[in-house]
Image (tube, grey):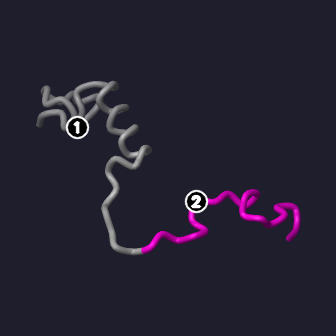
């Protein structure tokens, strides 16, 4: 199996990647939203907003 990032032969230590570098490139793409799927749905207005930034007092229960 070849590395999905660079095409070199994969390494058993980093399967399916050939190296730590290619594994990290793939992880960065996931974390950066590079692999997201487009949709027609409207985004959730409260999604991704930490509690302390949503206008509520985080110390109140």
Q: Residue furthest right?
A: 60
Q: Is residue 9 left or right of residue 34?
A: left
List x then y, in percent, for residue 48. 58, 59
Q: Is residue 44 magenta?
A: yes
Residue 52 position (above or below residue 3): below
Residue 21 in which image quadrant: top left
Residue at label 2? 48
Q: Secondary structure at mark 1?
A: loop
Label 2 or label 1, whichever comes before in sequence order: 1
Q: Residue furthest bottom?
A: 41
- Residue sitting at x 72%, y 64%: 54
- The answer to whether the residues at label 2 and label 1 have Cβ atoms under 8 Å apart is no
Judge by depth and name the residue closer to the eye, 58 or 53: 53
Report how many numbered discs are placed on residues in the image.
Answer: 2
Q: Residues within 10 Å of mark 1 (few under 14, many from 20)?
A: some
Residue 47, above or below 5: below
Rendered position, 36 above or below 45: above
Residue 53 marker: none
Residue at horizontal 87%, vertical 61%? 59
- Place residue 16 in its image quadrant: top left
How packed is label 2: few (under 14 Cα within 10 Å), some, or many (20 or more)? few
Q: Main secondary structure of the magenta part?
A: loop
**Residue 7: where, in percent of width, then height?**
13, 31
- Quadrant of the snapshot with the N terminus: top left
Q: Quadrant of the C terminus?
A: bottom right
Q: Where does the magenta region start and end?
A: 42-61
**Closer to the camera, 10 or 45?**
45
What residue does disc 1 label? 16
Q: Position of residue 44 (x, y in %)?
A: 52, 71
């Amino acid at each position: 199996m070849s590395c999905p990032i660079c095409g070199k032969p994969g390494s058993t230590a980093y399967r399916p990647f050939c190296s730590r570098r290619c594994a990290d490139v793939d992880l960065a793409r996931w974390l950066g939203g590079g692999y997201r799927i487009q949709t027609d749905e409207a985004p959730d207005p409260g999604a991704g907003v930490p509690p302390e930034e949503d206008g509520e007092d985080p110390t109140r229960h």
